[in-house]
Image (tube, helix red, strand yellow):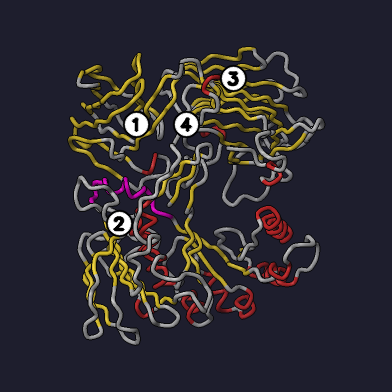
């Protein structure tokens, strides 16, 4: 196991030029820290001299620090550190997850206060639901509320006050993976369209964090890093992870420069009641103060970020004290630093320069995406620098890498067999990868593939190839997470799964598993078709609850299956989702009784949901295209009325049940154009997650 860590560290240095500063040799979120292994690893790390590349900085490698044990809620590793002098001397940094409190014997406070150890909040959430959506929530909490930016700010403060955590690691800060996997829609920056370079920033969440970092010098350098003044920190907010009780309690944190000439104090108020503080100052210079404040919009028509990072006051220090008021659902920083002319501190909305274009590789050929895994448009070392990682593919199980066959032709190959399969952290399913744009709607996927018939093993998953269509949610990393899946095995048996149920099972009369084959699977509207080597396998129509949009998944067993080409083509006269509006997008307006929820489960877009609590109720939006799809799961029968450009075009219609991130109603018209839609809920507790604007491709 040590060699695995070592080779990863070396590979990162050789490939990207950086050396890790910290390493945790134990298992993530362990309940039983392996203290003897951690000590052995630390000593080996500090003394290893063998088998390094000639130009590798071995002396710096010896300085890599141990961080342990990354437990989840549990705190017993802190007790082990206090009791074991050798362990404590070898592990300079400790951390654990999702718990602001210390252990019963306060071991982490002791490690920081008595032994000068770094204590980390080594995994914590970012805000769930972006601030621009959160300010529209029915709860009326502005930029606050459970799992909001203010909640995260309270976690930073409380985790220091209770357990001396001075570093908070976001899980994740940047989401550069396809949405729909586990833990989606909780990040500061979303970068999920590599083909366009488009990204989205939670400007509210980011600015709340900058209320801390903009007014201190961060880091561990004793000469430059500001100190946290423990006697001027406090949190009375309730909860251990989600700080959702007693949010009207005091919450503040103070930082002081090493020379004691400057300080900054952050105050957080995640409640409906304004807070007033009197702050006494001793042993610090009597300097001018600056108050920076962030809160939600004060008027319904104002922009969501109109009150972010405002310098609102310069209170005077009188008789060694000053007073400050923190409005409801707000964060303020009081500082002696004059940042009024610092453009990096002044708020500016961050948006991507690149448009959020749908992935269409060649519109004239109706080609959404094609990959031969050779990448002639890049330098010859392109794949070497990526470790054989193909473009736009994300492994959810197994490992798919580009290798060369006997003719030196690049092919995609699944690399892990049952014998090589590693111990799972929680669970994993058979090898599969995700690719493409979840706004693809009507398309056909074609794979040129070859089975691995030389690997001999007892595999519970079997030796097969699988394609799935219209995938939007994949919490478990399964091929079958998509609504439509076709699988073909080495014996020629194939099956169609719809919503994880086998609806068709058959076989190919003559099938040679040694040869290269071409498997195609497509969807147009609610009709599914499949072919093998140009010969039809089936046509099947989903009449019950069709899903209309989503990306592609491909999977196989734990065999070294090879793929030489992946092609995704738009269906003739098929639809494409050109834009997806979240239910809390400002472009969607509501009339009647609605409950707008945020911070919901990760299987719905942006963790938001709007529920009509009393019919009739309605919502309206503009669209440019041939129509639209309404997205969400309906828990009970719902009847809608549809009005387009002031004319009732559908008097009454009962929706499908839909699915989370799936369509429950679709409206199409013959010609594209600019239109205004009004949807009236006539009966039922209707739920809206998103609106997908559709255009028919010619």
User: CA separation, marks 2 and 1?
Assistant: 28 Å
> Where does label 3 land, which residue?
505
> Where does label 4 land, which residue?
358
Q: Is residue 319 above or below residue 125?
A: below
User: CA separation, marks 4 and 1?
Assistant: 16 Å
Identify the residue at horizontal 57%, vertical 74% (top origin).
80
In the rendered structure, find residue 460 and report the number of the disc placed on it: none
Q: Quadrant of residue 560?
A: top right
Identify the residue at horizontal 59%, vertical 44% (top origin).
428
Q: Is residue 342 left or right of residue 503?
A: left
Q: Quadrant of residue 411?
A: top right
Instruction: Of the two numbered discs 4 and 1 on the same chain, state the one appearing first in sequence.
Output: 4
Instruction: Of the two numbered discs 1 and 3 on the same chain, state the one appearing first in sequence.
Output: 3
Instruction: Of the two numbered discs 4 and 2 on the same chain, state the one appearing first in sequence.
Output: 2
Q: Residues within 10 Å of mark 3 (few under 14, many from 20)?
A: few
> Where does label 2 land, which residue?
308
* Residue situated furthest front in the rendering: 341
Q: Quadrant of residue 555?
A: top right
Res. 316 visible in picture: yes
- Disc 1 secondary structure class: strand
Q: Is residue 558 left or right of residue 218?
A: right
Q: Nearer the viewer, residue 335 or 480?
A: 335
Q: Is residue 96 above or below residue 161?
A: above
User: CA separation, marks 3 and 2?
Assistant: 58 Å
């Amino acid at each position: 196991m040590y060699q695995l860590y070592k080779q990863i560290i070396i590979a990162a240095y050789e490939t990207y030029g950086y050396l890790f500063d910290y390493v945790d040799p134990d298992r993530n979120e362990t309940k039983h820290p392996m203290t003897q292994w951690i000590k052995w690893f630390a000593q080996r790390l500090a003394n290893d001299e063998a088998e390094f590349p000639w130009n590798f900085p071995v002396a710096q490698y010896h300085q890599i620090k141990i961080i342990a044990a990354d437990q989840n809620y549990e705190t017993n590793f802190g007790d082990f550190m206090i009791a074991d002098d050798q362990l404590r001397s070898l592990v300079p940094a400790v951390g654990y997850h999702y718990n602001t409190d210390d252990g019963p014997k306060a071991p982490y406070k002791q490690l920081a206060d008595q032994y000068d150890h770094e204590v980390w909040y080594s995994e914590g959430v970012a805000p769930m639901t972006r601030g621009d959506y959160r300010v529209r929530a029915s709860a009326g909490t502005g930029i606050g509320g459970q799992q909001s930016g203010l909640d995260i700010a309270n976690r930073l403060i409380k985790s220091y006050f209770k357990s001396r955590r001075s570093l908070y690691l976001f899980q994740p800060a940047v989401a550069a993976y396809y949405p729909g996997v586990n833990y989606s829609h909780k990040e500061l920056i979303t970068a999920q369209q590599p083909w366009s370079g488009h990204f989205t920033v939670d400007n509210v969440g980011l600015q709340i964090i900058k209320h801390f970092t903009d007014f201190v010098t961060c880091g561990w350098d004793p000469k430059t890093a500001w100190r946290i003044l423990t006697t001027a920190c406090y949190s009375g907010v309730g909860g251990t992870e989600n700080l959702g009780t007693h949010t009207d309690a005091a919450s503040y944190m103070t930082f002081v420069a090493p020379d004691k000439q400057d300080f900054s104090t952050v105050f957080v108020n995640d409640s409906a009641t304004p807070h007033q503080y009197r702050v006494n100052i001793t042993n610090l210079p009597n300097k001018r103060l600056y108050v920076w404040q962030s809160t939600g919009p004060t008027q319904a028509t104002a922009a969501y970020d109109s009150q972010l990072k405002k310098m609102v006051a310069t209170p005077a220090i009188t008789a060694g004290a000053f007073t400050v008021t923190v409005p409801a659902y707000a964060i303020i920083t009081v500082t002696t630093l004059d940042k009024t002319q610092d453009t990096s501190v002044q708020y500016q909305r961050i948006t991507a320069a690149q448009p959020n274009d749908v992935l269409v590789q060649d519109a004239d050929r109706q080609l959404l995406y094609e990959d031969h895994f050779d990448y002639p448009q890049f330098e010859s070392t392109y794949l070497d620098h990526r470790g054989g990682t193909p473009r736009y593919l994300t492994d959810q199980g197994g490992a798919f890498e580009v290798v060369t066959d006997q003719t030196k032709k690049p092919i995609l190959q699944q690399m892990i067999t049952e014998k090589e399969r590693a111990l799972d952290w929680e669970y994993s399913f058979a090898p599969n990868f995700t690719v493409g744009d979840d706004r693809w709607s009507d398309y056909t996927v074609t794979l040129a593939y070859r089975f691995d018939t030389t690997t001999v093993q007892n595999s519970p998953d079997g030796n097969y190839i699988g394609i799935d269509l219209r995938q939007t949610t994949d919490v478990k990393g399964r091929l079958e997470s998509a609504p439509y899946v076709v699988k073909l095995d080495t014996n020629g048996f194939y099956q169609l799964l719809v919503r994880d149920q086998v609806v068709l099972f058959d076989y190919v009369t003559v099938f040679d598993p040694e040869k290269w084959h071409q498997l195609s699977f497509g969807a147009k509207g609610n009709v599914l078709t499949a072919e093998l080597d140009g010969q039809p396998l089936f046509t099947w129509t989903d009449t019950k609850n069709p899903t209309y949009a989503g990306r592609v998944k491909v999977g196989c067993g734990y065999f070294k299956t090879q793929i030489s080409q992946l092609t995704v083509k738009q269906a003739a006269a098929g639809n494409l989702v050109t834009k997806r509006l979240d239910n809390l997008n400002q472009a969607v307006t509501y009339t009647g009784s609605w409950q707008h929820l945020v911070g919901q489960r990760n299987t719905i877009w942006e963790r938001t949901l709007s529920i009509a609590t009393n019919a009739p109720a309605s919502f309206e939006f503009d669209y440019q295209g041939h129509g639209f799809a309404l997205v969400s799961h309906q828990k009970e029968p719902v009847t809608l009325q549809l009005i387009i450009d002031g004319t009732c075009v559908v008097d009454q219609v009962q929706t499908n049940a839909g699915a989370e991130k799936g369509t429950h109603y679709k409206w199409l018209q013959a010609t594209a154009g600019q239109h205004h839609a009004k949807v009236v809920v006539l009966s039922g507790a209707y739920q809206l997650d998103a609106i997908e604007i559709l255009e028919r491709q010619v």
